[in-house]
């Protein structure tokens, strides 16, 4: 399952590999997500991070994948039937600073506001804060709605993870559409409850299921109900002006 120390040990191990294998190619390795704000749930949480490269090169992507495989082999609690939960996105410095490629406005906000520089240069001060992009938020919500529709015949394990994760992500999108930023799970729940008290029960339930994942992941009835609720909730978020 792993502990908080195991999560950070795996990050440090990846950094050591980067310094050895990618010393001339990478600028910075920045951790985002739950680990960077201190609310991971061992057994549930993955590692979300950015490898900022000096320039774009397909060989770098292949090398990073190889390093992720080595981390996953050393820390097998990251291994799933759908790949590793040690997730590293590769982006060039130009993409990170210029909001290009897969780097969105929210990527820049997250990297700048709460990214934890694990190794390499601290570029957070150079990252701009672009304006809120509601069109991106709507497109992101549409993607989650479509994903749940496509994956409805999946295993309870993945249906549960997707439902919980998307409810929380949808709540964050709703908050962002109202112009407020929140990242840590308690911040999201609190801000959402203040803005949308009539909808917060589902968000609180998803938060609780996230914390109790080890207990509820085999509860098919609970997960099916949560999955259906997630789809309806995301459609509500999408309809918000």
Image (spheres, rainbow, N blue to C red):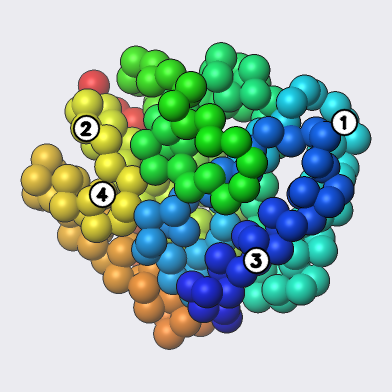
Q: Residue at x 90, y 35 (%)?
A: 59
Q: Nearer the viewer, mark 4 or mark 1?
A: 1
Which label lies toward us, 3 or 4?
3
Q: Secondary structure at mark 4?
A: helix
Q: According to the image, label 4 marks what residue?
A: 188
Tell whether label 1 touches label 4 (CB within 8 Å). no
Q: Nearer the viewer, residue 107 or 208?
A: 107
Whether residue 197 is visible: yes
Q: Which residue is mark 3?
A: 10
Q: Which residue is disc 2 drawn over? A: 180
In the image, 209 versus 65, the foreground residue is: 65
Query: Which of the marked residues, 4 or 1, is nearer the chain's N terminus?
Result: 1
Q: Is residue 151 above or below residue 81?
A: above
Residue 66: give x, y in percent of width and height. 86, 53
Label 2: which secondary element: loop
First-in-chain label (3 vs 4): 3
Inter-mark Cα distance, 4 to 1: 36 Å
Sort mark 2 into few (<14), some (14-19) or many (20+) by Cα contacts within 10 Å.
some
The reply to whether discs 2 and 1 touch (Cβ–Cβ < 8 Å) is: no
Q: What is the C-alpha distance between the residues marked 3 and 4?
A: 27 Å
- CA–CA distance in space, label 3 to label 1: 24 Å
Q: Residues within 10 Å of mark 3 (few under 14, many from 20)?
A: some
Q: CA distance from mark 2 to mark 3?
A: 32 Å
Image position of 236 with respect to 199: above or below:
above
Name the spot of residue 229 as percent of width and height, x first.
34, 55
Name the spot of residue 187 as percent of width and height, x first.
23, 51
Q: Point out which mark residue 28 bears.
A: none
92 sits left or right of 49 in the view: right
Residue 208 higher or lower than 181, as above or below: below
Residue at (39% x, 43% y) in the render: 114
**Disc 1 element:** helix
Q: Which residue is mark 1?
A: 58
């Amino acid at each position: 399952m792993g502990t908080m120390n195991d999560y950070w040990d795996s990050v440090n191990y990846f950094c050591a590999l980067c310094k050895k294998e990618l010393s001339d190619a990478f600028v910075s390795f920045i951790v985002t997500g739950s680990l960077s704000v201190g609310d991971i749930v061992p057994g549930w949480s993955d590692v979300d991070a950015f490898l900022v490269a000096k320039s774009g090169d397909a060989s770098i992507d292949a090398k990073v994948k190889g390093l992720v495989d080595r981390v996953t082999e050393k820390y097998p609690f990251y291994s799933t039937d759908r790949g590793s939960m040690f997730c590293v996105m590769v982006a060039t410095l130009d993409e990170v600073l210029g909001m290009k490629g897969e780097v969105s406005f929210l990527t820049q906000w997250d990297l700048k506001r709460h990214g934890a520089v694990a190794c390499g240069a601290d570029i957070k001060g150079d990252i701009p804060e672009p304006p809120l992009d509601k069109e991106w938020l709507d497109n992101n919500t549409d993607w989650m709605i479509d994903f749940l529709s496509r994956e409805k015949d999946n295993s309870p394990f993945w249906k549960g993870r997707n439902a919980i994760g998307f409810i929380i992500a949808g709540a964050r999108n709703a908050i962002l559409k109202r112009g407020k930023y929140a990242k840590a799970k308690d911040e999201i729940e609190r801000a959402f409850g203040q803005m949308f008290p009539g909808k917060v029960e589902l968000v609180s339930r998803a938060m609780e299921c996230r914390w109790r994942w080890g207990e509820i992941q085999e509860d098919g009835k609970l997960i099916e109900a949560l999955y259906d609720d997630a789809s309806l909730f995301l459609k509500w978020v999408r309809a918000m002006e």
